[in-house]
Amino acid sequence: MILAEWKEAVFAAIARACRAAFHRDPEGLEAGFPPEVGLGDFAVACFPLARPFRMSPAEIAARIAAAASPEPPVAAIRAAGPYLNVALQPAAFFGASIAALRAAGDRLGNSAAGAGRRVMVEYLSPNTNKPLHLGHLRNAALGIAITRLLEATGHRVIPAILINDRGVHICKSMLAWQRFAGGATPASAGMKGDHFVGTWYVRYAIEAEKDPSLEPAVQEMLQRWEAGDPEILALWKTMNGWVYEGFAETYRRFGMRFEVVYYESETYKLGKDVIADGLARGVFTRDERGNTVFVLPEKPFGREKDGSPKRVTVLRPDGTSLYITQDIGTAIRKVTEHALDSSVYVVGSEQEHHFQCLFAILEALGFPWARACRHLSYGMVYLPEGKMKSREGKVVDADDLIEGMVELAAEEIRRRDPEGRLAAEEIRRRAETIGVGAIKFYLLRVRPAQSIHFDPAESISFDGFTGPYCQYAYARIFGILEKAAERGIAEESADFGRLGNPEETLLLRHLLQFPEEVAAAAAEFSPARLAVHVFNTARAFNQFYNRHAVLQAETAGLAAARLALIRATALVLKRGLELLGLEVLENM
């Protein structure tokens, strides 16, 4: 039985007692876990009954408890002030719960809440003039987790990426390479392609300070690109190809996956026809300068200081587009090509106003799906000064951070293996899983809107609110189960009636809450909620294991029951970490 079914059993028992005491059914009651484990398995507040029953909640609770005649699986119903505390029979509560959790297996936490709905999750949005940075990793961690959470709740999710592959910033890398590289390539330089191209973007900035003629030259290159100059297009394709090869390696290492790739070079002209149609229909107007503008509704945008309506420009007087122009066209293209019900944009908080305007415009244009679109806004992420700085020295490079975290994990593994039993390849494999997982968990453990100060040493710790702590709890359980198998302890002989101490009960509560936490994290677009629950589950397991023997339990039946409980715990930990985008290790 899962949590909802247990609540139904509790309600049924209370309803029978209420009919016996008051000859009427109770309405509006809700069941939850009591604040202290020793109070019972479920608590029901009688406050909703006070008005219809014309009696104090404490009196109602006392009379219902006095009239109760519990039937299995309910063991007792007791009044505690205005609350009814319900105790279940341990054999039924633990046995049926563990059986249901294990039966769900890899589908644990899945639901049909979003069945039939198609949603695109667009994340990352890199530029092809430089490698990915720390901010991209937070974006990617959120994109991966939200994709998996929505899939778990029945949505058909299409992960997508929009690559900013055109514009003057791209031409700066191209011009610098053309002028100063002497024909060098990523292969000849021994560099990842994205890092190689990034060095020429940095070189342009250095040279432009000394040579003012570079600025008009780069503008000319952009004009030649827009005119379709074969030589410039060939260089553009070559250098972008180098970047994509580099990106692909980082995508793979961090677990990013995209079904659809949009390129700004293919979308930057979109939206103009939509603007023209909207202008004809009165959705847009022209201002005194000739800009095509959209008048923002007073609610929620407010007005300017002089009392005039706020406006957003969607097309310049010369007919050239802005970012919002192409975003309008791309949003419509997405829905048209993929029959979407909604789109999720994982983009930093500095773009909140942009997306509010975009969604308001799409709604004004008559697209009903606009209300279902969402900007998943996230805050900045920082590293302590001097930690893992990029090779350019301005931003924190994603590959540098990942490699640094993997090395920190490898150091911890070597410290825990003083005899040197692990091969170098095995250390590297484990370190990769731990290091990447540490980054993801640390970036996901707080609400997306919150800014983060990323502490590498804290994030890689095997103690505390970290990914490695949760991964280690899983590995610890796996080690216990391996030993149990070697000793021939069969879980079929489990005596669940022997379970029920505070640590076992608290652990079971966390396991039963898991599906609800998955649903809530998806509905709230907050992987942090699930990260907190996974950590609390790992902590509850450690508290249980530190106080109670499993393999050395008093009886074989109790040992088998505890093995079944921790196997279900491992399932929850693994599933929860997977939904957050982390892998698990059977040995740390």
Image: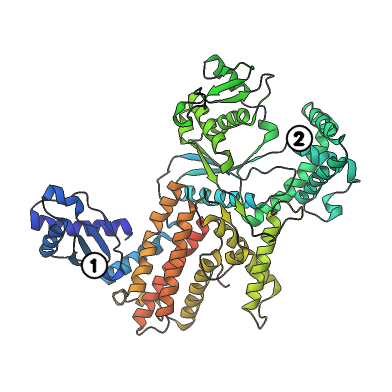
Of 177 and 183, nearer the camera is: 177
The residue drawn where x is 9% and y is 58% is 20
Q: Sequence order check: which comes first, mark 2 or mark 1?
A: 1
Would you say 493 lies left or right of 293 here? Answer: left
Residue at the spot of label 2: 168
* Residue type, label 2: Val
Residue drawn at the location 30% of the way across and 62% of the way down: 33
Q: Residue at x 22, y 52 (%)?
A: 29
Numbered label attached to residue 87? 1
Q: Quadrant of the C terminus?
A: bottom right
Q: Quadrant of the N terminus?
A: bottom left
Percent x, y of residue 28 = 22, 49
Mark 2 vs mark 1, CA separation in Å: 69 Å
User: For numbered disc 1, what is the local secondary structure?
Assistant: strand
> Where does residue 400 sit, x and y in percent of width and height?
71, 58
- Residue 410 in view: yes
Q: Residues within 10 Å of mark 1 (few under 14, many from 20)?
A: many
Q: Position of residue 367 (x, y in %)?
A: 48, 27
